[in-house]
Amino acid sequence: MEIRSSEFLRRVREVRPLVHHITNYVTVNDCANICICAGGSPVMTDGEDVADMVSISSATVVNIGTLNGRTVDSMRVAFSTASEKEIPMLLDPVGAGATPYRTETAEMLMASRPTVIKGNAGEIGVLSGLGGDVKGVDSYGSSDVASAVESLARATGSIVVATGEIDYVSDGNVTYKLENGTDMLGNVSGTGCMLSSVVGCYIGAFGRSIGAVVSAVTAFNVAAEMAVTRCDGPGTFKPALMDAMYNMDGESLDDRARYEMA
């Protein structure tokens, strides 16, 4: 299936989806800003108005990077509300496999059948049951990544994204291999969280669509490729990444996109 990422990019900017986030406090500002640059409108709340805010949102993004009992309760409410109202939802299972608490929380939230599960190769390997190596919040190895995304997608009904040197996206029937990106993404904290926000924008505009998810990951990685040519190192890479995402044009995106069915 051919995917024209430019068409997905154009639609996101037209719709300007409201994306609710419960994300970790290390990267919350970066997530808000990249959401704006991608064409969405971010809102961050994990308190008493979670259900009300999710109800008026186009999508909800839940990131378990900095867990505590209160935020886990809010995550549960967010996904319950989104499921009831058929609002697209994304789970970013940060650090699943590093501690039992993180793994158990991720598995509890997966039971809500999120639209998208997006993690690094180690996290997805752990959650798929095929095995992965996670230390802290970083992946240091995994089982066969293509098999892991396919297995987890079939088990959950979610579109599954595994990030790494090569990214994989699967809905359980079709799997894509994505080859855009740069090593500089690994030198800045929060780029995985930022990617989740971008994917949140795309599913907020399109709902459950593997084409939208592939296009979101591709747009982010193409922006990173552009940014790395305009920076002096990690400190200037992040603002350059936001600029590149904001200034992305559809023709450049389609020309640079590198993906294929796996």
Image (spheres, rainbow, N blue to C red):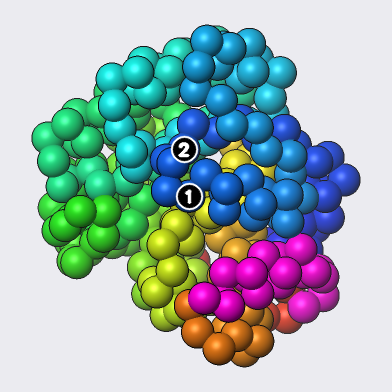
Q: CA distance from mark 2 to mark 1?
A: 8 Å
Residue at 64 percent across and 59 percent down: it is 215
Residue at 58 percent across and 12 percent down: it is 49
Note whether 185 is above or below 190 in the view shown.
below
Q: Secondary structure at mark 1?
A: loop
Cβ–Cβ under 8 Å for marks 2 and 1: yes
Q: Residues within 10 Å of mark 2 (few under 14, many from 20)?
A: many
Q: Amino acid at mark 2?
A: Thr
Overall secondary structure of the magenta section? helix
Q: Quadrant of the N terminus?
A: bottom right
For residue 27, the mark is: 1
Note whether 250 is above or below 20 in the view shown.
below
Q: Quadrant of residue 140?
A: bottom left
Asked if residue 249 lies left or right of residue 71, the reply is right
Q: Secondary structure at mark 2?
A: loop
Q: Quadrant of residue 229?
A: bottom right
Asked whether residue 171 is in view, the answer is no
Comparing 136 with 154, the one in front is: 136
Q: Quadrant of the C terminus?
A: bottom left
Comparing 97 with 212, the one in front is: 97
Range of magenta residues:
235-252
Residue 2 location (% of width, % of height): 66, 64
Note whether 231 is above or below 68 in the view shown.
below
Residue 171 location (% of width, % of height): 46, 45
